Amino acid sequence: MKTFKVLGGGCRNCEVTARAIEQAAKEAGVAIQLEKITDMAEILGHGVMSTPGVVLDGQVIHSGGVPAPDQIRAWMRD
Amino acid sequence: MFDALGALIAFRLLHLEPASGLGAAVHFFVMDVAKIFVLLVIVIYVMGLLRAMLSPERVREFVRERPDWQARGMAVTLGAVTPFCSCSSVPLFIGFVEAGIPLGVTFSFLIASPMINEVAVFILAGVLGWKLTALYVLAGLAVAWFGGIVMQRFRLERWVEGYVWKIRLGEANRVEPDRSLRGRHRQALAEVREILRRLWLWVLIGIGVGALFHGFVPEDWVSRHLGGEAWYTVPAAVLLGIPLYSNATGVIPVAEAMLTKGVAVGTTLALMMSVAALSLPEMLILRKVIRWPALALFAGVLAVAFTLVGWGFNLIA
């Protein structure tokens, strides 16, 4: 089980990112838990200043824009 | 080339009269849509290939713990070259505050960033030429530099929301981005898609407004009322820009149409700056971290600065 967090104030780009991750997980048949973090203290607690950011199992793996589809697919593998 | 394409579609295919308002508008619209979107794709892709991950997190590390003038110089330059989504301005603001970067320097960054970015600069140069682009960039840098200094004078600290001071920034444990050529190519393509998705509507609206202006606003009316003689046209342009929400790229076609019709250069620059840096939605986002008096000051300082820039260029021209 992978736990994803999408960090962002709730703008469109953050929504798009969250949906893309859900979609990719469904296609890959991977069970994930996805949480949208809008609390600024927690977002900055991860050291991220440019949203949307993505955290996988406690590790920041992306920040500053909507991630590319094949990037998201790669997160589902290993 | 784009001119010919516009003529082909407007006059040959649609059989419009070149002298008619509709003909001129359609010609302008087709020409600008083709020109600006081709430029956009090329510029964003090349920038995506070149960009060595200049993220706000990096900027913060560069700027912190430097003397004021150095920090401001870097903040303004980096603000001009780093594009960021406006919803990032809140975490960015908090991150800067937390690093102990003076608020005036942070505001210099927040002013420079929406007003000048490399995509807008290249499109501006492609559509209006290098001379006007240089004027716009220089004026924008100056406004960002002095705007931040003026704001600092008002002891902004008292208007920052209390919770901002309490947040502590964690250590980012980022994985390094893929630096191979394939990785960069993929990154650049993703960037083209993302930025185009964010911009296309604003650019189309901008071209539409520009086309209507170009086709239907009579030239002698423009030169009589907007030719730079009347002092009030510049502040009026700045006020008009505030409720108009777009970005620097979106207003370029409007500026193009205005200039070809004889609107004064300073008036046009003032409108461009106001639309790019002074929009209501962006200010409402900043409301999350600063109180109303600070927002009013921000708007006031920028409005005065843009008016001065406009008057200055109208005088010189």
Image (spheres, coloured by chain):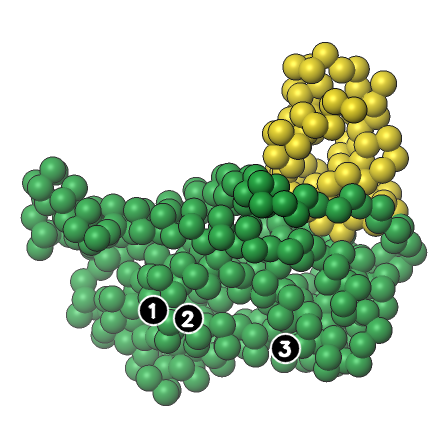
Chain colours: A yellow, B green
Q: Earlier in the sequence, mark 3 or mark 2?
A: 2
At label 1, counting other C-alpha atoms closer than 10 Å, the crowd grade (few under 14, some 14-19, many 20 or more) is few
**What is the C-alpha distance between the residues marked 3 and 2?**
18 Å
Lateral position of residue B165 relative to residue A17, left or right: right
Q: Within the image, what quadrant is residue B303 found in?
A: bottom right
Task: Please tell me whether mark 2 sits on a helix, a strand or a loop.
Answer: helix
User: Does B60 sit above or below residue B25?
Assistant: below
Query: Dot 2, crowdedness within 10 Å: few (<14), some or many (≥20)?
Result: many
Q: Which is more N-terminal, label 3 or label 1?
A: 1
For disc 3, the marked residue is B145
Q: Residue at x 80, y 29 (%)?
A: A4
Image location (x, y in percent) of residue B13: 11, 37
- Residue holding disc 1: B129
Q: Residue furthest top?
A: A29
Do the numbered discs 1 and 3 sit on residues whose CB atoms are within 8 Å? no
Residue at 14% across, 49% down:
B7
Q: Amino acid at mark 2?
A: Thr
Residue at 58 percent of width and 45 percent of height: B181
Instruction: Note whether B272 is above or below B10 in the view shown.
Output: below
Residue closest to the eye, B229 or B8:
B8
> Depth check: B313 or A62 in front?
A62
Residue linked to disc 2: B133
Asked if marks 1 and 2 touch (Cβ < 8 Å), the reply is yes
